[in-house]
Amino acid sequence: MSHVAETTSNLSNLRVRAVTQLTDGIRNDLARASTSEAMAVLFRLASSPSTAGDALALLHELQVHQVEVEMQDEELRHSRVELESALIRQTTLFEHAPAAYLIIDEATVLCEINLAGVRLLGAASNELLGRPLASFLSAASGEELQKMLARAREGAVPETCELQLLPQAGVIRKLHGTAGWEDSSGHFLLVLLALPSPG
């Protein structure tokens, strides 16, 4: 048997013996044992000249494991900071985009809307959420919106369609709209751009 294989085998046997001593046959793994219980096993092993070497090997393994856990914890903290920064960036982009971004459900009810969308629909954000987008559109545009959503739901490549808002103060406004389906949330992302007024 090679030296590496022998060392690995000894460490494996040592782990089994330590778990057995630690758990007294009650627990099945060292990970669940408390620190005080682990220290008691180390103390018992270190107290006997015949097992003092085993105690040192086990202590070394525990120290390596501790360093691994600390490194994993540091990586997780770093990943969390990166994810939070990315979320803030994406939220800022969503909120301050020049195009209207709307999250709607299959009944066209507004779930989320950015500032450009609020300006486009001409109402306060709290008045818009929970209302169907179709209620802001002409009847023909409401039907066109439903067709576009159905195509998006089927996974079709997003197409642009022309929609018309209901007149406000006698002004008719036309929009280009594109929709994408998000399986994970069961919602659509709708992007609306106001077309220039004729004339």
Image: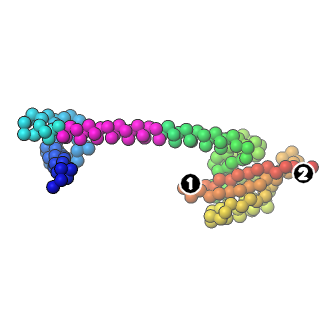
Left or right of 195 in this view: 52: left
Secondary structure beneath dot 2 equals loop
The magenta segment is 57-79
Q: Splitting the image into 4 quarters, where does residue 58 fall? A: top left
Left or right of 35 in this view: 78: right
For discs 2 and 1, the disc positioned in front in the rendered view: 2
Residue 14 makes an appearance in the image: yes
First of labels 2, 1 by sequence position: 1
Secondary structure beneath dot 1 equals loop
Give the main secondary structure of the magenta stretch: helix
- Front residue (pair 158, 71): 71
Compared with residue 4, is residue 183 higher up or lower down, i.e. above or below?
A: below
Residue that mark 2 sits on:
198
Residue at left offset 71%, top offset 56%: 178
Q: Position of residue 153 (x, y in %)?
A: 63, 62
Left or right of 193 in this view: 189: left
Q: Is residue 198 inside the magenta stretch?
A: no
Q: Residues within 10 Å of mark 1 (few under 14, many from 20)?
A: few
- Front residue (pair 120, 63): 63
Residue at left offset 67%, top offset 45%: 113
Q: What amino acid type should be assigned to the residue bearing mark 1?
A: Ser
Q: Is residue 64 inside the magenta stretch?
A: yes
Q: Position of residue 193 (x, y in %)?
A: 76, 50
Residue that mark 1 sits on:
185
Locate the N terminus by quadrant: bottom left
Q: What amino acid type should be assigned to the residue bearing mark 2?
A: Pro
Residue at left offset 16%, top offset 48%: 10
Q: Residues within 10 Å of mark 2 (few under 14, many from 20)?
A: few
Q: Across the whole image, how many numbered discs are drawn on residues?
A: 2
Residue at left offset 56%, top offset 41%: 86
Q: In whole angstroms, how far apart are the C-alphas of marks 2 and 1? A: 38 Å
